[in-house]
Image (cartoon, rainbow, N blue to C red):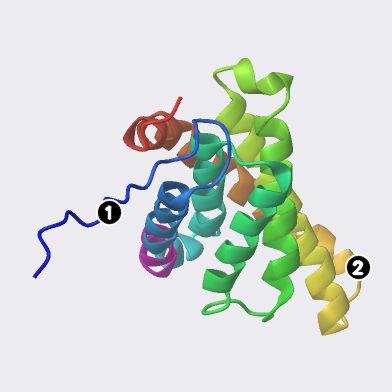
């Protein structure tokens, strides 16, 4: 038997701010697992009073804030999030469009001049949720054959959801960023 040392292999993360690595994907997976549970429990409970938080959107927003992926990589995070949405969505497949566009909006704002401000997670998550929610409401009406006026009826729910998600992301962004050992 040989006594030679086997080659030691290490996994090094990509430099902070350089995009996705395995730890970034693990962060997203952890956030999505928590978001799915929160959607099924707290989300359904709050739906009774007219608020329907979308913790899945908050999860990819937090992952984007913490990892600062490139715009195409952010779209991938949105697409991965859409896979989780397929378990509970009312219109299968639509989330692949809505979540990829929401993640892209989040990434664009997180990489803009706004990124230096403390309120960036709040503003960017609000906009990302609006993009996703308005796309879902509008395209969902098209798919279901409903009139476009129905989208206006859904507008208060979309705006309320965006506000709720924005607050969640703003509160959790510093914690998630520190926990992921990134700036």
**Residue 41 highlighted magenta (yes or no):** yes
What label sits on residue 119 in the rendered view? none
From the top left corner, tell me how far across and down residue 86 is, in percent.
Answer: 58, 77
> What is the distance, in whole Å, between disc 2 and disc 1 at their CAs?
62 Å
Instruction: Please state if 87 lies on the left or on the right of 174 as rendered.
Output: right
From the top left corner, tell me how far across and down residue 105 is, in percent.
Answer: 73, 43
Front residue of this view, candidates 26 and 135: 26
Task: Name the residue that disc number 2 marks.
Answer: 148
The correct choice, above or below, for 97 with respect to 87 in the image is above
Q: Is residue 127 at all visible to an observer of this figure?
A: no
Which residue is rendered at x = 45% and y = 62% of the image?
43
Crowd rating for badge 2 (residues with CA inside 10 Å; few <14, some 14–19, many 20+): some
Magenta region, residue range: 34-42
The correct choice, above or below, for 81 with respect to 101 in the image is below
**Residue 144 highlighted magenta (yes or no):** no
Q: Secondary structure at mark 2?
A: loop
Image quadrant containing the N terminus: bottom left
Image label count:
2
The reply to whether discs 2 and 1 touch (Cβ–Cβ < 8 Å) is no
Front residue of this view, candidates 85 and 181: 181
Q: Secondary structure at mark 1?
A: loop
Depth-wise, is mark 2 or mark 1 nearer the camera? 1
From the top left corner, tell me how far across and down residue 120 is, in percent.
Answer: 61, 26
Q: Quadrant of residue 51?
A: bottom right
Name the magenta segment's main secondary structure: helix
Which residue is rendered at x = 57% and y = 54% of the image?
57
Task: Name the residue that disc number 1 marks.
Answer: 7
From the top left corner, tell me how far across and down residue 129 is, in percent.
Answer: 66, 49
Q: Quadrant of residue 144?
A: bottom right
The correct choice, above or below, for 13 with respect to 140 in the image is above
């Amino acid at each position: 038997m040989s006594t030679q040392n086997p080659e030691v292999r290490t996994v090094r993360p990509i430099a902070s701010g350089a995009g996705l690595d395995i730890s970034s994907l693990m962060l997203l997976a952890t956030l999505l697992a928590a978001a799915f549970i929160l959607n099924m429990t707290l989300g359904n409970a709050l739906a009774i009073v007219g608020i329907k938080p979308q913790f899945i959107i908050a999860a990819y927003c937090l992952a984007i804030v913490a990892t600062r992926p490139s715009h195409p990589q952010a779209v991938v995070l949105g697409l991965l999030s859409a896979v989780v949405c397929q378990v509970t969505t009312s219109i299968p497949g639509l989330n692949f469009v809505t979540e990829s566009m929401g993640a892209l909006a989040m990434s664009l704002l997180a990489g803009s001049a706004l990124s230096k401000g403390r309120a960036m997670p709040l503003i960017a998550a609000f906009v990302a949720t609006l993009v996703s929610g308005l796309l879902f409401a509008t395209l969902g009406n098209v798919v279901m054959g409903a009139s476009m006026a129905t989208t206006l009826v859904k507008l208060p729910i979309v705006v309320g959801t965006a506000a709720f998600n924005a607050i969640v992301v703003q509160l959790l962004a510093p914690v998630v960023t520190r926990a992921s050992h990134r700036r």
